[in-house]
Amino acid sequence: MKTVSQPKPSLRDAIEEAIISGEYQPGDRLEELVLATQFGVSRTPVREALRQLHEAGVIEIKPRRGASVAVVSPQHLLNMFETMAGLEALAGRLAARRLDETGRAEILACHEACDAARKDGPDAYYYENERFHLAIYKASANSFLEDQARSLHRRLKPYRRLQLRSLNRVEHSFHEHEQIVEAILSGNAEAAAQHLWDHVTIQADRFHDFFASIAKR
């Protein structure tokens, strides 16, 4: 089996990692000079990374107050995951109906990459998992849906990464991927939609466990 090397994290990802690991808590200020020193770069790339994180909704930037880690309530986060599940379900339904050879090959390649990345830990798996979902958005052949799904996917990125660190979540995620791939490739639109909805939606017990893990950071 081909070994999959984990991509080198970008500065944006490195700052995001500091946030989801608890080094920076919700509401904490993010000083450009402090971050530049911490990561051994100039303030220019830090400013660009903060801009990207602001666009994704991970941080807030206010005039004369600078950047700070966004504060997201449990209910708002639950609402975002439910909306994400709806977009993904629609993308899966359309992909099952409209799949062409290019889309089939891309989804299978991404699924195989997820399989290979499982042994390398949740963060390595996350990057391949992200490509897997983006391939499904693309296969929907609906550019507006793809844009909206990509946008919300970026907004939820730190939480989806953190969720994969839960016990056995990577293995469960990959098993769910197998069901999704089978449904899409067989043209079963309703099964594809349901599997994606279940895959993305955080159900009650898992949601409370997820927030308990955030509270312990």
Image: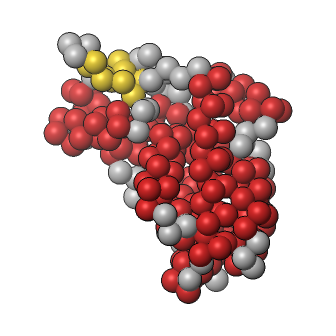
89 relative to 70 in the view: left or right: right
**Image position, residue 89 (x, y; %):** 67, 55
The single residue placed furthest to the top in the displayed view is: 64
* Position above or below: 164 against 118: above
What residue is shown at x 72% (from left), y 51% (from top)?
197
What residue is shown at x 72% (from left), y 25% (from top)?
212
67 relative to 172 in the view: left or right: left
- Residue 39 appears anywhere in the view: no
Viewport quadrant of the C terminus: top right
**Image position, residue 16 (x, y; %):** 44, 38
**Image position, residue 135 (x, y; %):** 53, 68
9 relative to 168 in the view: left or right: left
In the foreground, 146 or 129: 146
Picture quadrant where residue 196 is located: bottom right
**Image position, residue 79 (x, y; %):** 63, 31
103 relative to 200 in the view: left or right: left
In the foreground, 141 or 149: 141
The single residue placed furthest to the right in the displayed view is: 205
What residue is shown at x 21% (from left), y 27% (from top)?
33
Picture quadrant where residue 13 is located: top left
Viewport quadrant of the N terminus: bottom right
What residue is shown at x 77% (from left), y 45% (from top)?
167
Q: How many marks?
A: 0
- Residue 123 appears anywhere in the view: yes
* Position above or below: 178 against 185: above
